Structure formats: C-alpha cells, structure tokens
Amino acid sequence: MYDYKRDFPVFEKYPGLAYLDNSATTQKPVQVLEAVEKYYREENANPLRGLYGLAVKATDVYENARTAVKGFIGADSEREIIFTRNATESLNLVAYSYGRTSIGKGDEVLITISEHHSNMLPWQLLTEERGAKLRYLKCTETGEYTPEALKAALTPRTKLFACAQISNVFGRLNPIKEFADICHANGTVIVCDGAQSVPHIPVNVRELGVDFLAFSGHKMLAPMGIGVLYGREELLEKMPPFLSGGEMIEYVTLCGATYAELPHKFEAGTVNAGGAVGLHAAIDYMSGLGFAEIERRENALTRLLVDEMRSIPHVSMIGADDPDDHHGIVTFTIDDVHPHDIAAIFDEGNVAIRAGHHCAQPLHKFLRTPSTSRASIAFYNTEEDIMRFIGCLKTIRRRMGYSE
Amino acid sequence: MNSFYNEILTDHNMHPVHKHELSACTCSKDGINPTCGDEITLNLKIDDGVITDGSFTGSGCAVSQASADIMLDLVIGKSVDEAKRLRELFMKMIRGECGEEELEELEEAGALADISHMPARVKCALLGWRTLGEMVE
C-alpha cells in the first residue's frame, strides 16, 4: 500500500504522530506547499486590476484556480464559484446577501439540529433580524434524516433549508439530491454545507441540484483562509454584495456604484490568490489520487476503527452501526471520563483527536451528552495510526483509576 | 510513559473528599469554564478570618474536579490570608516559576505542576482557585 504520508512534510517532523483530527483540518502535501511558495516567489502581484505582465500572471493563476474548482464540483460556469475565506464565510454570505433580500416577516428557515454552529448561527441572526422563524429538523438517535421527515417539516412558508451533506459529528451522508427535489417542489431554496463531504466523496452540484454549496479549502489539503461558495447563477445575479470595497465595482460615484460582474461582485478587497493557488494544487492532488482510492482507503480504515472500538468495554460510539455510514468520522464517549481528559491522554500517546462539542452544542444537548470525543480519518492515515489510537483507547479508563 | 494523569490527580477525581453539599457554609460561589463546560460551586465556612470548612459540587474534567478537591485539602483550617498566599503560589506554579521549596508548600497541589506545559488545560486546574479568589478578595 502506497504510503501517502511521504507527501506530507509534517510527518517527517512528527513521524510517530497518529493525526486523527482531519475533520478539523487536514495536513498539507508538499505539492500544495510548493505551489503556494511558487506563487509568492514567481507569480505574485495584486490580481484583477494590474496592467502589467506580472499582474496578468497573478490574475491567470487565480482564475485558473476558479476553473479547477468549477470542474471539481461540476458547476456550469466560473461565475458560480466565489472564493471566500472558508465555509463559515460562505454560509454567512448566503445568509446576509440572499437571506436579507428573500426572507421576510413570518417566513421560515429550516435547518437540522446537527448543523455546525457555522450553519446555525447565521440563520439564527437572520431570522431574528427579519422577524422570521427558525425551525429545526430532528434526527433519529443514529443521526438519520429521512426524506419523509423533511417533507413533513416543510410548510408553504419555508423559504430556505440548510443542511450539511455529511455531519461533522455523525459522519452520516444525508440524501441531499432527494432533499433538493423535495425542497424545490415546495419552492424552498436548499443550502448545502459541504465542509465534511467535498474532501471525502465526489460532489457534483448539478447532480445534487443544490442552490448553494459551501466548503473550506483547509479541510481538503489546501491552506487555511481559502474557501468556496457555489451558487446557482440566477440566484447570485439577484443578490446584493455581501462585503464592499475594492475589486468588486464597475464604477463608483459619491452617491453609489455599479457592481462588478459575477463572481467578482462577491469578492471585495484583495483576494487570497496564494490560497486559491494552493486549493488548485490540492484539487490536482486529489484528482490524481481519485475519489475511488480516497474512499477505498478511508472506508477500510473506518471499518477497522469501528470494529476494534466495538470490542472495548465502556466505549460508546455515536451514529450509525455500519462503518460505511461514518465517512471517516467516529464520535465516541468513554464512561466516566471527560473528553478533555481523553484528548489529553491521547496526546501523551502521540494521537491527535478532537474533544468537546465540535461546534454542535444544540446537538449534544439533544443527544443528552455534554461533550464527546472524535477521531476523524483522511486517506493518508494508516492502519498503524488506527492501532495506535486503539492501543491508547484501551488504557484510558485504567489510567484514570478505574479497574477496567 | 510519564503521564500528567498521576495517582494524586486520578485519586482526587475518583474519590473526592470534599465533593458534597455544605449546609453550614457562610458563603458560596459558582465557577464556570464556558468553553469546556467545567462547572463547580464552591462553599466555604469562614469564622473570624479562618476557613473552618469547605466543599464543592459540580461536574467537569478530572483536572478541574481534582484540583478543586486538592485545593480544599490545602486551605481548610488556614486563615483567609494564608489561603490567598497559597493561591498566589499556585498561580506562580502554573506559570512554571515555582522553586522546589515553594512547590512543597503546595503539598499535593504540586502534582499539577506539569500543567504549565498544557496551556489548554490551565483554566481547568485554575477553576477552583479562581473561584476561591473571587470569594476572598
């Protein structure tokens, strides 16, 4: 089996580290690091405005990155790809720009109870401001949302439904295509948070039929600070700018402005060209690998992880029974041991995991557990990483003073 | 492996001596770490400037709960002024600035000295002491 860790310099520095916090952010391969460095060494100028050779080069590499994103998620046009800082900013853009002009008093916004805070708080603020109502779709104990439940929850006033394609707590894949069809039959716009799905499974916005898709570069090998909002062109066209300033205008007078064409209308200020170039390199890396290989490796490691965890007493996993329903995300609790102590003991064992509420406090309340621990896998993880994690997990209760 | 989770810490977490209600207390105060959800209520009985009894209730990670229990071991029977001085000493230890002799004065609380290398957990170890500070300052 090819050792993909060889592409990731961080593992030269920390050879024994079992990095299992990939849902928070992934490590970066040398191909991405070199592309970003090359940009700043050889291609850097302020894109989109400069009238000289180097600025044209910077504009080219920035726009090439947009084309790569378009192809990667199957959008129709570059006009539908907006670069942001991350998925959070993308979702805020939709809430502020689309939400403020399309959600009115008495309207409803529906989101799931397991949404990440970044796909919850913008809707809380928006509905409060607009005098609209925010409603929550509840899941089963194993984190499942069914098309029937969605159908039953929609009303004629439901203007917008926001939902993660893969939950960052359950790892479960939601049937977004069916959800999109149900929403559209009801005249409801669907916003999909792809932060945990785009890095791990093939996502095609045309096939899914979503109106908006948000994701972050840093969870898919790219640098921090670059993210994407996909939006259907006819919706984006009607939306007012989110942020205003340089590089997003056609013409400015003392009393107003005409705004630049899509997608630049939504990219105020100097853009993160280095980040976009890094995202382009990350997409090339993942495309070279192929999602068949990514999924095969991640699913095999998830299966090993879940099978081993099942045999450990006092360990409970959250979500589906079938490891294939976890997409590399395994959230768990250990009886009588606080997640922060769990993460600290894993750290002593050179295993990096996440502990806390994973930015999903309402879900934890719903599940009646104040906080949990989470291991999350990427294709570059190895069986050794999983077994290091399992070896450490088996010792935790004893190390906290329990007899087993 | 040299573990931060030594026997003193795990023992105080599993078998806390002072984790109970205290009906005779003269003052009590809630302490909370919002980001990790650790919470305690600290109860003290202070007579003529001396902490004659104390207890805590609450929930949270082992570090927060054990540290509160160890603190009460240390300050019960001491004057309020002495408790303030020990609190200063504990803060100094957390900053990694304590000498050997000072560390001994802290008795079992010295078992938390290594937390100075774990910035994310400092607030857990401090929860009890911080709450005590708010009550006596």
Image (spheres, coloured by chain):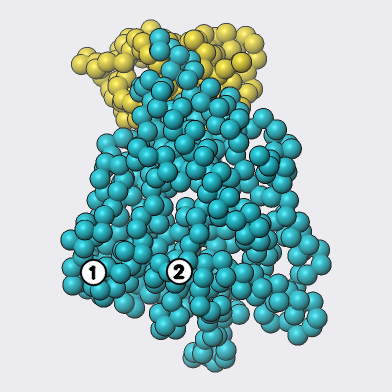
Expressed as whole percent of the image width and height from the top left, the position of residue A92 reads 43, 65
What residue is disc 1 on?
A158
**Chain at tag 1:** A
Q: Indicate the quadrant containing the N terminus of chain A: top left, top right, bottom left or bottom right.
A: top right
Q: Kindly indicate whether the residue at mark 1 contacts the one at mark 2 (C-beta within 8 angstroms).
A: no
Mark sitting on residue A205: 2
**Badge 2, how many Cα within 10 Å: few under 14, some, many 20+?**
many
For image coordinates 56% across by 71% down, the residue present is A70
**Chain at tag 2:** A
Chain A, chosen colour in render: cyan
Of circles 2 and 1, which is in front?
A: 2
Residue nearest the viewer, comparing A226 with B94 = A226
Amino acid residing under circle 1 = Thr
Q: Indicate the quadrant containing the C terminus of chain A: top left, top right, bottom left or bottom right.
A: top left
Quarter of the view holding residue A111: bottom left
Expressed as whole percent of the image width and height from the top left, the position of residue A391 reads 53, 22
Taking the image as shown, residue A154 lies to the left or right of residue A122, namely left
Q: Earlier in the sequence, mark 2 or mark 1?
A: 1
For image coordinates 44% across by 30% down, the residue present is A307
Relative to A123, does residue A327 appear above or below in the rendering?
Answer: above
For image coordinates 38% across by 13% down, the residue present is B14
Q: CA distance from mark 2 to mark 1?
A: 22 Å
Is residue A232 visible to the viewer in this orientation of the structure? yes
Q: Which chain is yellow?
A: B
Amino acid residing under circle 2 = Val
Expressed as whole percent of the image width and height from the top left, the position of residue B78 reads 41, 9
Q: Secondary structure at mark 2?
A: helix
Residue nearest the viewer, comparing A108 with A288 = A288
Q: Secondary structure at mark 1?
A: strand
Is residue A117 visible to the viewer in this orientation of the structure? no
